[in-house]
Amino acid sequence: MRVPRIAAALVAGVPLALAGCSGPREVRVGDCLQDLAASQPKIVSCQRPHEGEVVSTVTLAGVTYPGVEAIQQQVRADCQSAFERYVGVPVTESPLDLVPLVPTKLSWEEQSDRTVLCVIRKVDGSLLEEAVSQSGD
């Protein structure tokens, strides 16, 4: 999956919808992202302030777009497990939040976009200052 184009505004606790794939390279687990609400978030160094960090990618199957809520339900357990492995504690015991970035109906249908990014960010919306891998936060 390439750096996503975000179709929905970033709202605390609400999954974002991706509007297709574009960008300089594949997004990988451990990549840090800035400008999540922009049309094309940027991959940045995790040692610089950043909005989110990718802990997992989940590839979905199916022909018909299931909708944001159905996708969110489908990936919840996978994203939560990935969070715990990546950070070292369950999301319920962390000051960090977990947000799935999901494909939009348009990207699903026109670009065969089936990838969900499980992204960590701070609950209060402030920037992460460093990588959170195995931080225990």
Image (cartoon, helix red, strand yellow):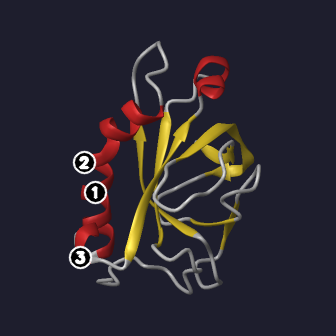
Q: Quarter holding the C terminus?
A: bottom left
**Disc 1 vs disc 2: Cβ atoms closer than 8 Å?**
yes
User: Which disc, if any, is residue 93?
Assistant: 3
Judged left or right of residue 91, residue 1 is right
CA gap between label 1 and label 2 equals 5 Å
The CA span between labels 3 and 2 is: 16 Å
Residue at left offset 32%, top offset 63%: 83
Q: Which residue is mark 2?
A: 77
User: 74 or 135, which is in the foreground?
Assistant: 74
- Identify residue type, mark 3: Glu
Marked residue nearer the N-terminal end (1 or 3):
1
The residue pinned by badge 1 equals 80
Q: Residue at x 56, y 86 (%)?
A: 129
| Structural crowding at the residue carrying mark 1, measured as other residues with C-alpha within 10 Å and reported as few (<14), some (14–19) or many (≥20) | some
**Does dot 2 land on a helix, a strand or a loop?**
helix
The span from disc 1 to disc 3 (Cα, nearest Å) is 12 Å
Where residue 80 appears, as percent x and y from the top left, is 28, 57
